[in-house]
C-alpha cells in the first residue's frame, strides 16, 4: 500500500507540472537536429511509457525575465545562484565563449579531477583524453576562467530551435561559485539576446539531491516538455 501511495503521489505531481512546448528546427542542421529530437523523445531508459526528456524537464522560461537584473533578482538570497555568482566574480572568475581545442589539457584535468560526482562514478568517456573536439554548428561552448586565465569549468549548450539545452556542465570542485557564475551568466546572455524561449538543464527526476538543489538555486523549475520537430 505504501508503494502504491507513493506512485499515486508521483503521478499527481507529474500531472500538476506546467507544460512547455519545445520546438526543434531542422533547418538549423538537417542531420543533427532530427537526431537530437529522436534522443529527447525516445522511450525513457527506466520508464518506457514516457519520453526520455519529457517529465520533470528542468527549464527556465527566458521570456519571464525582462532583462538580466530581473532574472538575478529571482535567484537572489544566501546560498542561491546570484549570491554564489557574485562571490565567484569578486574572486576574478569570468565567463567566455571558448574554442575547446585551445583547452584540451585543462578540460581533461577538469574531467578527471574527482572520481565521483553526485554520488556516481565518472563515466568512462570523461576519463579518456580527447585529442581534438568536433565543433557542432548548433552548439555554443563556454568556459569559466580564473584570474590566472586557467579554465576552471566548462559548459556545452545545444541550440535546437526555440530552446537550448546544456549537455555538459562540469568544473573543478573548489566551492568558489564558478559553476553558479557560468550558468547565471549564460542565462543572462540568452535573456539579453532574446532569441529563445527556454533553456533546459536535463531533468529533475533521477537527479541527485545536490544537483536538484543546484538547479533550483539557479531558477530552473520542473515542467512536462512537449516536443515538436519542424
Image (spheres, rainbow, N blue to C red):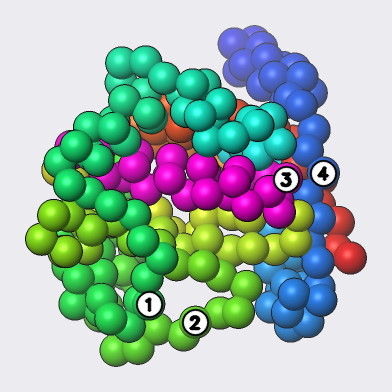
The answer to whether the residues at label 1 and label 2 have Cβ atoms under 8 Å apart is yes
| Residue 135, numbered label | 2
Give the CA distance from mark 1 to mark 2.
9 Å
Judged by its main secondary structure, the magenta piece is helix
In this figure, which residue is indicated by the disc labeled 3?
Answer: 197
In this figure, which residue is indicated by the disc labeled 1?
Answer: 99
Looking at the image, residue 40 lies above or below residue 75:
below
Give the CA distance from mark 4 to mark 1.
31 Å
Q: Earlier in the sequence, mark 4 or mark 2?
A: 4
Q: Position of residue 56 (x, y in %)?
A: 64, 35
**Image quadrant in which the N terminus is located:** top right
Q: Earlier in the sequence, mark 1 or mark 2?
A: 1
Which stretch appears magenta?
175-200
Q: Is residue 53 left or right of residue 146?
A: right
Q: Earlier in the sequence, mark 3 or mark 4?
A: 4
Looking at the image, residue 150 lies above or below residue 67:
below
Q: Earlier in the sequence, mark 3 or mark 1?
A: 1
Q: Earlier in the sequence, mark 3 or mark 2?
A: 2
Looking at the image, residue 194 lies above or below residue 216:
below
Identity of the residue drawn at 41% across and 19% down: 76
In this figure, which residue is indicated by the disc labeled 4?
Answer: 21
The residue furthest left is 148
Query: Regarding mark 1 in the picture, which secondary structure is present there?
Result: loop
- Residue 114: name its quadrant: bottom left
Amino acid at each position: 500500500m505504501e508503494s502504491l501511495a507513493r506512485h499515486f503521489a508521483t503521478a499527481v505531481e507529474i500531472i500538476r507540472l506546467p507544460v512547455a512546448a519545445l520546438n526543434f528546427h531542422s533547418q538549423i542542421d538537417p542531420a543533427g537536429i532530427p537526431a537530437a529530437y529522436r534522443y529527447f523523445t525516445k522511450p525513457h531508459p527506466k520508464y518506457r511509457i514516457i519520453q526520455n526528456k519529457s517529465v520533470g524537464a528542468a527549464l527556465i522560461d527566458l521570456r519571464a525575465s525582462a532583462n538580466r537584473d530581473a532574472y538575478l533578482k529571482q535567484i537572489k538570497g544566501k546560498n542561491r545562484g546570484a549570491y554564489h555568482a557574485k562571490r565567484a566574480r569578486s574572486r576574478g572568475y569570468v565567463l567566455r565563449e571558448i574554442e575547446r581545442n585551445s583547452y584540451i589539457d585543462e578540460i581533461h584535468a577538469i574531467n578527471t579531477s574527482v572520481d565521483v560526482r553526485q554520488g556516481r562514478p565518472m563515466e568512462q568517456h570523461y576519463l579518456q583524453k580527447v585529442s581534438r573536439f568536433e565543433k557542432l554548428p548548433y552548439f555554443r561552448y563556454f568556459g569559466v576562467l580564473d584570474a590566472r586565465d586557467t579554465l576552471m569549468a566548462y559548459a556545452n549548450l545545444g541550440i535546437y530551435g526555440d530552446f537550448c539545452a546544456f549537455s555538459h556542465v562540469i568544473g573543478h570542485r573548489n566551492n568558489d561559485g564558478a559553476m553558479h557564475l557560468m550558468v547565471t551568466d549564460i542565462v543572462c546572455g540568452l535573456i539579453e539576446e532574446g532569441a529563445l524561449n527556454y533553456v533546459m538543464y536535463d531533468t529533475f527526476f533521477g537527479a541527485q539531491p545536490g544537483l536538484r538543489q543546484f538547479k533550483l538555486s539557479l531558477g530552473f523549475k520542473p515542467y512536462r516538455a512537449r516536443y515538436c520537430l519542424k
